[in-house]
Image (tube, grey):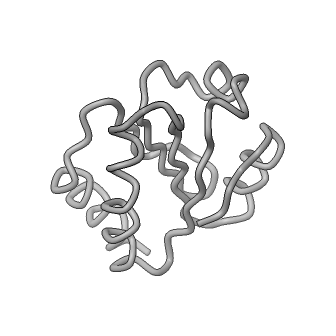
Amino acid sequence: MEILNSIESINNFIKENRISMVYFSSNSCNVCINLLPKIQELLKSYPLIRYGKVEIDKVPEAAGTFSVFTLPCILAYIDGKEIIREARFISIMELKGKIERYYEFL
């Protein structure tokens, strides 16, 4: 997982990777902290997906730039276009189903 510390690094990460996932979280969010290992475990089955993490505490402007209104938030992109947006109550099973639908095309 790549730590993304600026708007520029987030944008570059999305542009440079064919399929990418960005996890927005906060150090003060227990749900964010507990969900991350589950997301990491899920993504082991999808080696083409590059994923990065943004800590909103360190990059607060990212919330406005990417319209993140609640945490945790997951944004997935293919060729720079947003394909998945999940926030707050994230079901790993539903997320897996969405990822599989797009992943099959790759």
- Residue 98 x/y as whole percent: 27, 54
**Left or right, 47 with reference to 41:** right
Above or below residue 41? Residue 98 is above
- Residue 14 x/y as whole percent: 67, 53
Q: How many marks?
A: 0
Where is residue 37, by image quadrant?
bottom left
Above or below residue 12? Residue 101 is below
- Residue 64 x/y as whole percent: 64, 19
- Residue 86 x/y as whole percent: 35, 38
Q: Residue at x 68, y 56 (%)?
A: 3
Q: Which quarter of the rendered picture does the C terminus lie within? A: bottom left
Above or below residue 14? Residue 17 is below
Q: Residue at x 44, y 43 (%)?
A: 74
61, 77: nearer the viewer:
61
**Left or right, 37 with reference to 26:** left
Q: Which quarter of the rendered picture does the N terminus lie within? A: bottom right
